[in-house]
Image (tube, helix red, strand yellow):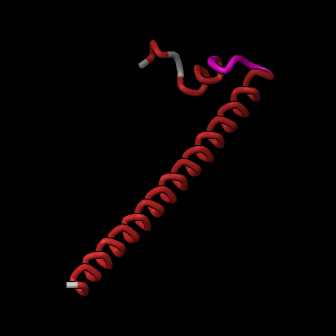
Amino acid sequence: MMSLQCRIRDAIVTISSASRGYMWRTANVTLQLALVGTVVFTTMTLIFAATLSESTLDNDFFELLRAKYGSPRNL
């Protein structure tokens, strides 16, 4: 009877430690995805801000878009 209780306890400990490892892996992946998303968002924001600031030195941003793509009425 004692060995059955030991086996059950060992099984519970094994399952709980395995699930704890899974939770840590899930948390690490979530943090990595959040970090990558933050880096991509920051990079895109900086690129857009640089493009916008370059265009406002000489011309209006929308004038540059119209010159490049044409007027919306032409579509």
Q: Residue at x 65, y 40 (%)?
A: 42
User: Relative to residue 31, is residue 43 drawn left or right?
Assistant: right
User: Relative to residue 61, is residue 73 drawn left or right?
Assistant: left
Which residue occupies the foreground of this view, 18 or 6? 6
Q: Residue at x 26, y 82 (%)?
A: 7
Locate the N terminus by quadrant: bottom left
User: Relative to residue 22, is residue 8 drawn left or right?
Assistant: left
- Residue 18, by quadrant, is bottom left
- Residue 61, by quadrant, is top right
Give the x, y percent position of residue 21: 44, 67
User: Over which residues does the magenta segment extend?
Assistant: 58-62
Give the x, y percent position of residue 44: 62, 39
- Figure disc tally: 0
Which residue occupies the foreground of this view, 20 or 5? 5
Give the x, y percent position of residue 47: 67, 38
Which residue occupies the foreground of this view, 51 or 75? 51
Q: Residue at x 53, y 21 (%)?
A: 70
Furthest toward the right, the residue is 57
Give the x, y percent position of residue 51: 70, 32
Is residue 65 inside the magenta stretch? no
Q: Residue at x 54, y 53 (%)?
A: 31
